[in-house]
Amino acid sequence: MAYIIIDEQSYEIDTDEQEAIARAALCDAGIEYADVWNGSPDCPDSYKSSTNKLFAASPIEIGDKVQPKQGTCADEDMEPGKVLEVEGDMALVGWESGVRTMIELVELEVVEASS
């Protein structure tokens, strides 16, 4: 079982319907994303995923021109790039230098949205 917590309330996200309800709750709370927990909300053995996050809505789409957000570990000497693929909370970005890297969505900002 996977779930998120918003203001001390847990939302299961194992099905598409549950995920849609959780995303709506994130939007209603004005929260961009939440950490994903694995296990049961009632079980003390639940643990927070070190990499998974659930976004209220993905602000980044395939074809967007992006750059690393200031202050993230990815912002050092990185030029803008184009989003080639979005998978969960990660994006494959083709940088202007020709290098391709997977990077967390939370570390990117859109410079120019795709049409």
Image (cartoon, helix red, strand yellow):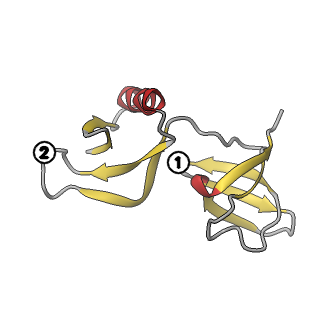
Residue 99, x across and y down, in percent: 79, 69
Distance from Cα at disc 1 to Cα at disc 2: 26 Å
Residue at numbered disc 2: 42
Q: Quadrant of residue 114?
A: top right
Q: Amino acid at mark 1?
A: Gly
Residue at numbered disc 1: 88
Q: Identify which residue is drawn at 67% across, 54% down.
A: 108
Q: Residue furthest bottom?
A: 77
Q: Specify the quadrant that holds the N terminus.
A: top left
* Mark 2 surroundings within 10 Å by alpha-carbon count, few (fewer than 14), some (14 through 19), many (20 or more): few
Residue 98 lies, with reference to residue 17, above or below; the image says: below
Q: Identify which residue is drawn at 13% across, 45% down.
A: 42
39 left or right, relative to 80 = left
User: What number is the disc on residue 9?
Assistant: none
Contact? badges 1 and 2 (CB < 8 Å): no
Q: Nearer the viewer, residue 76 or 82?
A: 76
Q: Amino acid at mark 2?
A: Asp
* Mark 1 surroundings within 10 Å by alpha-carbon count, few (fewer than 14), some (14 through 19), many (20 or more): few
Q: Identify which residue is drawn at 69% across, 62% down.
A: 70
Residue 9, x across and y down, in percent: 25, 36
Residue 40, x across and y down, in percent: 19, 46
Q: Identify which residue is drawn at 50% across, 36% down.
A: 56
In this view, the mark in front (1 or 2): 2
Q: Earlier in the sequence, mark 1 or mark 2?
A: 2
Q: Nearer the viewer, residue 77 or 37?
A: 77
Q: Quadrant of residue 20?
A: top left
Residue 17 lies, with reference to residue 110, above or below; the image says: above
Q: Secondary structure at mark 1?
A: loop
Residue 52, x across and y down, in percent: 43, 54
